[in-house]
Image (tube, helix red, strand yellow):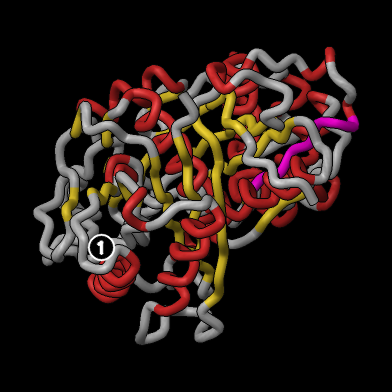
Amino acid sequence: MRTVRPLITGLGVVAPTGVGVAEHWAATLEGRCGLRPIVVDDAAGPPFPVAGRVPDFDVDAYVPRRLKVQTDRWTWMALAATRMALDDAGLDPSRHDPYALAVVTASGSGGNEFGQREIQALYSTGAQAVSAYQSIGWFYAASTGRLSILHQLKGPCGVIMADGAGGLDAAAQACRLIRRGTAAVVVGGTEAPLSPYALVCQAGRPGSSTEPDPGSAYRPFDRRACGDVPGEGGAMLILEDPARVSPRDAYAELAGASSTHDAHSTFGPPRDHRQLARAMREAIARADCTPQDVDVVFADGAGDPWRDELEAAAIGQVFEGASVPVTVPKTMTGRLCSGGAALDLVWAALALRHDTIPPTVNVEPGHDLDVVTRPRRGTGLRTALVVARGTGGFNSAAVLRRVV
């Protein structure tokens, strides 16, 4: 199999930091936090007091009405982000062989709001009130299917389920497809886990913050860290065969990726960081880099003291104690499950293009790490390592490299 390092040529963002790359990047550099109190019409109150919510998302601007009623909010976001990414890349699927184009998404929970609505209709009115689209609207592969049909992407399509690591695993699968001859892959992930049903499903998840103040609810690598917060949104990217496009049209090169598994517990990490560190080392090696070549680490940043300690130790081991800048810009969005790593890839690609490390907000770093808390410009960024973990033992890492 030929050695191919795909180019990232298009980005699309629907996130608590904004809709569209320009708005998202501007909010990032301002350190504008998208975490908000959760308000529900329920005397018991929500299981999480704070979450990241997408502001001013005009679904009608991106999703046809006939498709809107058939799909859930998480798919609306994937459709919108994909439209932006295709436009950004200048890629018109109708002008290409549909069997040379593919889509791979990451999903963690599927169409929660759609499923809740239809279940309520079933029990309040009866089976005749349930939409025929209930059978597919909630399904974790719904976004991949809808994108494939809408844009006629008929190459090898699929969906990855690895919780917070899913976005990186989807990108790694896209790399494999391009090496096997696929010309371009739409890749990424979105989530919409903030409906009442979805929040209840997450209520027993370990490591969740109960802090009601958005400014202190999610503080990774901070000694006061008390857990993470959920969020909605994510990102989609266009990966293309470098033989098809000029490097000058690309944000970055996806140089290497790796995944490992703790094989320890469904609910928490092991007492060591071996598999997390191995994922980082293998991604760096597959990119033909050394740790000394890495200019910034986009960390997973669990926000849970124990998980943060494990990640800090893994970073310290991989980089042999050298000081490498570390950032967790998802402190502005919350942890977006399968949308989180995809959004981190976007942040890393934009950081390389603009030679600016985005900040980690609302933290006072307490670990032996160089955590970037304000935008750090003009450092000569060439290589970024993105790290992600998922509940259940998933560890993934990817290396992005500037190409011009």
Q: Quadrant of residue 323?
A: bottom left
* Residue nearer the viewer, 85 or 2: 2
Tell me which amino acid carries mark 1. Thr
Q: Nearer the viewer, residue 275 or 67?
A: 275
At 57% across and 22% down in the image, what residue appears?
247
Q: Position of residue 39 (x, y in %)?
A: 33, 44
Confirm whether the magenta stretch covers residue 361: no
The answer to whether residue 258 of the structure is visible from this angle is yes
Instruction: Tell me if residue 101 is in the magenta stretch.
Output: yes
Q: Position of residue 72 (x, y in %)?
A: 65, 39
Identify the residue position indicated by label 1 in the image.
210
Percent coordinates x, y for residue 155 in the rendering: 86, 37
> In terms of depth relative to the viewer, which is nearer, 181 or 259?
181
Query: What residue do we see at 53% from left, 26% from top?
Result: 11
Residue 103: quadrant of the picture:
top right
The answer to whether one can see residue 45 in this image is no
User: So how many labels did they put on this image?
Assistant: 1
Residue range highlighted in magenta = 99-105
Quadrant of the rendered image containing residue 44? bottom left
Q: Is most of the magenta stretch helix, strand or loop?
A: strand
Local secondary structure at mark 1: loop
User: Residue at left 83%, top 52%?
Assistant: 127
Q: Is residue 117 left or right of residue 338?
A: right
Q: Compared to 227, does 289 lie above or below?
A: above
Q: Is residue 117 above or below residue 389?
A: above
Query: Does 60 sit above or below residue 355?
Result: above
Query: Residue 66 at x, y = what percent?
Result: 78, 22
Residue depicted at x 72% and y 19%: 65
Q: Residues within 10 Å of mark 1 (few under 14, many from 20)?
A: some
- Is 352 placed above or below 42 here? above
Left or right: 76 in relation to 352: right
